[in-house]
Structure formats: C-alpha cells, structure tokens
Image (cartoon, rainbow, N blue to C red):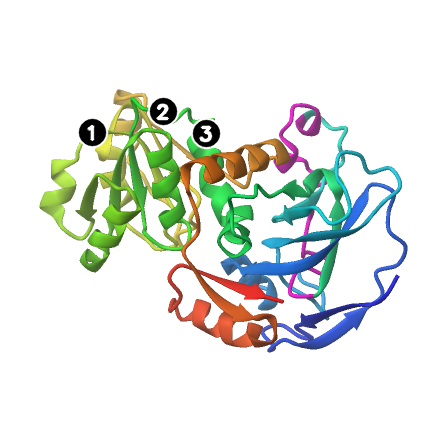
C-alpha cells in the first residue's frame, strides 16, 4: 500500500505541516477511503492542543470524513469499491460487549476514535472498520453532509433517543455549529421548535432554519414567559448560563439534555426536578445504525450543514477561523 499523505501537528498547539505515514497492511474488516471532504470540528482543535491529554504526536486530525472506498479488507461485506461513504468520530468498537450487542456501539468501553492515537481525515486517505463506514445518500452533497457525521449525529441521537415527535415542544439552546442542525432535525420530526440564543441578530436565521419561536435568553422577561412550556431542551452551547431557568422552562416529565459542554460545573436546584419529575442528561454521538438512519432522514427532509469550504492545504486557515468563531457554521476541507 502507498503511503498516506496528510497534515499533522507535531506538538501540542502547533500548526499543521505536511506529513506522510505507512498505514501497513489493510485489516480484514477495514476499508480505506479516498477522502474528498473532511469537516473541521471543535474536537479537532481540542486534540491539536492536547486539551484532553490523549493526543500523541505527530497527529493528523479530522473525523468528519467523506470519500470513496479505495480498498476493502477481504472480510468486508455489503460495501463496494468506489462507493461514497462517511466516517465520523468513531471508527471501531469491540463488537462483543453488552453495548455493542445492543446496537449501542457508541457506548462501547473499547471504542476507537477515528483520530485519537491514530491518524484522521486531514489527509488524502483514511482507514476504519467497515461497520463504521456509512453510505451517503445521493441526495446529499458531500460538503454539506460531512459535518453531519459528528456534529449532526451529536444532536440527532438525543432527539431520537428521547422520542421527539410531532406532539413535542422542543427548545434548542445555541444557534451555532450544532444548534443550526438541531433546529432542522427537530423541525423534520414535526416538533414545535423554539430557538434560544444570546444573540438577537440570529433570530432571522433561526426562523429560516425552521424555528417557530425565538427567545433571547439574555432577557429575563422572555425566559419567564416560556416557563413550563417545553418537553425537551437540547443545550448545544459551550457557555455558562443560568441552567435553573431552563429547568423551569420544562413541562412536568421534561428533560434538559447537554451536548454542548459549559466550562463550569452545572449547578441546579433539586426541587423543580423532584416536583415535576424533570430530568437532566447528556448524550454522546450515535451508533452506526443511528448514523445511517440520520443520513436517510437528512436526505429526505433536506437537512444539511451550512458550510464554508477551504482547500485541504489551507487547513490552518480554517482552524484559525473556527477558533475565532468566524465560520457560519461549519468549516469543511476539500481535497
């Protein structure tokens, strides 16, 4: 096999430089994907900086990968050479634990990430277990579909797991890289969607994406008016907020779910949880089954990430723009 060419960080926080590596023989269950597009996710920035203490250098980031299958391991079934597929945050699991056998591979204790302790998608090719190579429906453009593989599934999974449906009243907190996709999916499920944002300027965009209502979360009066009206609130923002006001916005048996990570610990009064049987939870990515389902729903309902494209060679420029929150809403690298 030829060497794989990519862009790697050689130390924590360093800019990416050209780098190549020998991937070795292709595993029996693996696929090699010739990459056309790779999303730039906030997780990549954390990994480049080694914020989570798991990065090993040199390191090629990238885990929102779309491309065509260039090679298949000899035990791979159901996929073919030349087929367009995507790989997200996860690229393998043990396949035999309780969670894998329940179809919840995303909760496998031995899960392997596409770009942790291995090289990811800011490259010409990448490898992963074939079970995690998700066919991309023809109706989806690769550039708009790439961010669905991590950002999209991060919001789709909790909406599905918590049975959001046409009777649901759903709040989406934060209209950014995750939130703009969450609004579209909640609307596709037929829910009544309320967008919460600290930026009043985002109201038109939120409504264009499918929100029925917009609440400026800086306005105390507006927050009081929505008390007791939501069945499910999904927080996609990575900022501290008054979480008690969101719990108060829930109807009895409602849930506040975190996919965005606020910098400070979440502090909540217990009584509103007890009195209304309300709950607070978190949610990670989804299983391969959920990824396939999400792609099908996106194709049928026209859900797509709003993207800004950069040539792969300008990955450092894309990273800087993402760091400064200057991309609306997802940066995507194109080979």
Q: Up-down: is 245 above or below 143?
A: above
Mark 1 and mark 2 residues within 8 Å of each other at the beta carbon: no
Left or right: where does residue 168 sit relative to residue 10?
left
Q: Up-down: is 314 above or below 65?
A: below
Left or right: where does residue 286 sit relative to residue 233?
right
Task: Decide: few, some or many residues near mark 1? Use Cα within 10 Å; few <14, some 14-19, many ≥20.
Answer: some
Figure quadrant of residue 263: bottom left
The residue wearing badge 3 is 160
On residue 229, which mark appears? 1
The residue wearing badge 2 is 165
Quadrant location of the N terminus?
bottom right
Q: Secondary structure at mark 3?
A: helix
Figure quadrant of residue 165: top left
Quadrant location of the C terminus?
bottom right
Magenta residues (range) = 99-123
Question: Whole-Å distance between the Cαs marked 1 and 2?
Answer: 15 Å
- Position in image of residue 35 (x %, y %): 67, 59
Task: Decide: few, some or many residues near mark 2? Use Cα within 10 Å; few <14, some 14-19, many ≥20.
Answer: some
Residue closest to the eye, 31 or 168? 31
Question: Whole-Å distance between the Cαs marked 1 and 3?
Answer: 20 Å
- Position in image of residue 222 (x %, y %): 12, 44
Residue 122 lies in the magenta stretch: yes
On residue 35, which mark appears? none
- Position in image of residue 111 (x %, y %): 69, 42
Q: What residue do we see at 63% from left, 75% from top?
A: 16
Q: Quick one: label 1 or label 2, which is nearer the N terminus?
A: 2
Q: What residue do we see at 48% from left, 39% from top?
A: 299
């Amino acid at each position: 096999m030829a060497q794989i060419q990519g862009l790697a960080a050689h130390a924590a926080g360093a800019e990416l430089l050209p780098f190549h590596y020998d991937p070795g023989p292709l595993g029996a269950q693996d696929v090699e994907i010739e990459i056309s597009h790779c999303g730039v996710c906030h997780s990549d920035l954390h990994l480049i900086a080694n914020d989570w203490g798991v990065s090993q250098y040199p390191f090629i980031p990238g885990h929102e990968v779309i491309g065509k299958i260039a090679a298949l391991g000899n035990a791979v079934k159901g996929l073919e050479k030349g087929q367009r597929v995507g790989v997200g945050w996860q690229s393998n699991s043990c396949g035999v634990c309780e969670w894998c056998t329940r179809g919840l591979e995303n909760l496998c204790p031995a899960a392997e990430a596409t770009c942790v302790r291995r090289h990811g998608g800011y490259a010409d090719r990448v490898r992963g277990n074939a079970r995690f190579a998700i066919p991309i429906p023809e109706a989806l453009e690769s550039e708009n579909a790439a961010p669905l593989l991590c950002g999209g599934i991060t919001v789709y999974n909790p909406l599905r797991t918590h049975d959001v449906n046409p009777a649901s009243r759903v709040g989406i907190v934060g209209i950014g890289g995750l939130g703009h996709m969450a609004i579209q999916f909640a609307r596709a499920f037929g829910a009544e969607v309320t967008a919460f944002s600290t930026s009043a300027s985002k109201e038109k965009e939120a409504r264009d994406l499918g929100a029925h209502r917009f609440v400026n979360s800086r306005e105390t009066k507006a927050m009081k008016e929505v008390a007791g009206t939501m069945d499910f609130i999904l927080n996609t923002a990575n900022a501290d907020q008054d979480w008690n006001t969101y719990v108060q916005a829930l109807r009895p048996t409602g849930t506040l779910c975190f996919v965005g990570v606020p910098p400070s610990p979440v502090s909540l009064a217990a009584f509103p949880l007890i009195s209304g049987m309300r709950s607070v939870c978190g949610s990670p990515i989804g299983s391969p089954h959920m990824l396939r389902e999400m792609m099908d729903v996106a194709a049928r309902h026209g859900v797509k990430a709003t993207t800004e494209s950069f040539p792969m060679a300008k990955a450092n420029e894309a990273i800087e723009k993402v760091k400064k929150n200057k991309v609306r809403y997802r940066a995507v690298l194109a080979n």
